[in-house]
Amino acid sequence: MYEFAPDPQAPKGEVYHDLCQAAQALVADEPDRVANMANVAALIWQFVPDLNWAGFYRVVDGGLILGPFIGKPACIRIPFGQGVCGTAAASGTTQLVPDVHAFPGHIACDGASRSELVVPVLRDGRVLAVIDLDSPSLARFDAQDAAGIEALAAALSSAI
Ligand code: SME
């Protein structure tokens, strides 16, 4: 059994630090990338408040395919360059979207989503996957959330 106890009162930077430590501990001795993505999706859900979807899209044959996640069933395949996830994958850069309705080409998987943060997971400059967080609140994510999930993505680089 794994017991992680996020402190809802802790400053955001501390929460992401603890999330990263927990993720590193969970993936350290496990080579199976699906198991690692599944556990990290569960950790994000546990540590990051006010989400309605959290998980992974994997790069497969030049496109994105749905990976382990928590939330409602989502679109399975996203071409590079389409939607927030495809934009993050094609550019290799974080996409911080305060209002998904204002993002051209946003792909609505859950009608409750109002803001979104997508961070690519890179290895040797190649995009392996993206981490996607959706929130029902407008402008839920800020630069600190982006930095926290980027640190998590860097920690996962050799584990997924
Ligand atoms: N909104 C994403 C699609 C994935 S779902 O949010 C889970 C996008 O525009 O790429």
Image (cartoon, helix red, strand yellow):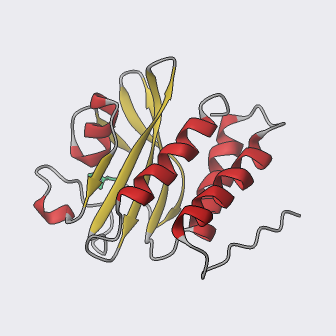
Q: Nearer the viewer, residue 59 or 24?
A: 24
Q: How many marks?
A: 0
Residue 129 position, x and y percent, is 47, 35
Residue 21 position, x and y percent, is 72, 52
* Residue under the image location 69 percent in, 53 percent down: 39
Residue 140 position, x and y percent, is 34, 71
- On screen, residue 25 versus residue 15, left or right, reads right
Q: Nearer the viewer, residue 4 or 31?
A: 4
- Give the farthest residue toward the bottom: 9
- On screen, residue 35 versus residue 3, left or right, reads left
- Give the farthest residue toward the right: 1
> Quick check: 7 above or below 89?
below
Which of the 4 image quarters holds residue 100? Answer: bottom left
* Residue under the image location 65 percent in, 40 percent down: 34
Residue 134 position, x and y percent, is 38, 64
Q: Quadrant of the C terminus?
A: top right
- On screen, residue 101 versus residue 49, left or right, reads left
> Quick check: 35 above or below 158?
below
* Residue under the image location 41 percent in, 44 percent down: 119
- On screen, residue 113 versus residue 128, left or right, reads left
Q: Quadrant of the N terminus?
A: bottom right
Which of the 4 image quarters holds residue 10? Answer: bottom right
* Residue under the image location 21 percent in, 40 percent down: 82
